[in-house]
Image: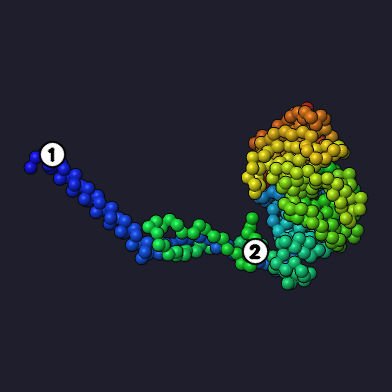
Amino acid sequence: MSASVNTVYMKRNISAVLATTGLLLVSFLFSSCLKDTCRHTYKIMTPVYKKLTDLRAAVKSTAATTIVNTGKLYLKDNWIFLNEQNKGIHVIDNSNPAHPVKAAFINIPGNIDIAVTQNTLYADLYCDLAAIDITDPRHITVSSFLTNTFPDKSSNPTTGNPDSINVITDWASRDTTVSCDQNLISCGTCPSPVFYSANNSPAPSSSATSGKSGVAGSTARFATVGVYMYAVTTSNLNVIDLYEPSNPSLIQRKNIGWNIETIFPHNNKLYIGAGSSMSVYDLQNPIDPQQLSWSGHWCSGDPVVADDNYAYVTLHNENICHNTVNELEIYDLNSPGNPLSTYFLTSPQGLSKDGNLLFICDNGLKIYDASDVHGIKLIKQIDGIQTSDVIASNGIAYLVAKDGLYQYDYSDSKNIHLLSKLSK
């Protein structure tokens, strides 16, 4: 047999083997999809409930503890109240800002926000508003609870009986493997992961005042003005009567839009930051605030502070829209509408203003001379800190960071320096 014939013969054999192998492979895949069951593993999420009565009983003073997950900040006299997200409040004695001391911890399940009037601290406890006597901040007593102030966090928002209210306090997960019959050659078409929860429950997801109240940061959802407290939820403005501080009462729940995030009081007005707007409400009638202006912006996170003439808004892209907007917008309060000035930033969060100085949490802390809103000037930049909010008051900037609480002395704008760091 000639070499050319041998070559042809070998090629035919190889082709036959490949063809046979291919048919066997297709046959195997096809039969396996017909006979076998496609299996897919995913997580089932179910809510963990606790009775509101039990959660209320947990509110108490305990020994000072480690700072783990910093949240909102509130200043009152020589005390700093620093939220530990969903856990409670660190009570810090700041009599000497160069050496702050963790004095106690107030255990408050589900706590995020803080406000103070006279000697009463107000804190959210999931759906409730707790009124807490802080005459001695180291040893608190609970004065009262205002039930279902935040009904979106309650399993039974129509009742005032705490024994009848269950609150989602956590989510439990377990892996589950299911089978899915396939009639296709490829078994790569199983359903993607699904999350289930019982009952269709939702998945886990500065202007200094003196005397009665303290100072909150720009990310606050609580604001006290006179004998009233204003608390925003994602869509409502709650008006709460504090005439009797130890026994607050809800006056009204006013719908003001959607994706509401922050509230800031100044000059008898409320500045409300939302995911797509900044609005101003007048408090001429304090029990029924009326909208004065509304300014829209790109879907972004939106802390806001104000002085007598301007509102300062930071927009950042850490939100459901996942856009690329990271900037400072300045609005003229005498001519609301489009921003007067815009400045591009990196990833701004909370901010504060004192005199001509503007403080912005932006991959650290940036301090600007804002005496000319058309041309603010950076005078100090502090890097290497992951920050979320700042309160500038009486020469000290109180800076909330992931790794603790920093205090900077800015009494001399040419010599801004670190006073202290209270770490975890």
Asked whether, in this view, residue 423 is left or right of residue 96, the answer is left
Residue under the point 41% across and 62% down: 182
Of residues 357 and 5, which is closer to you in this image? 5
Name the side, left or right, on which 1 lies relative to 271: left
Residue nearer the viewer, 11 or 155: 11
Q: Quadrant of the N terminus?
A: top left
Q: How many neighbours does mark 1 have within 10 angstroms: few (below 14), some (14-19), or many (20 or more)?
A: few
At horizontal 67% and vertical 50% (from top left) the residue drawn is 69
**Upstream in sequence: badge 2 or badge 1:** 1
Q: Is residue 113 visible?
A: no
Residue designated by label 1: 4
146 on left or right of 156: right
Residue 197: percent from the left, percent from the top? 60, 64
Amino acid type, residue under disc 2 in the picture: Ser
Q: From the top left corner, tell me how far across and down residue 421 is, in percent.
A: 71, 41
Type of the residue with mark 1:
Ser
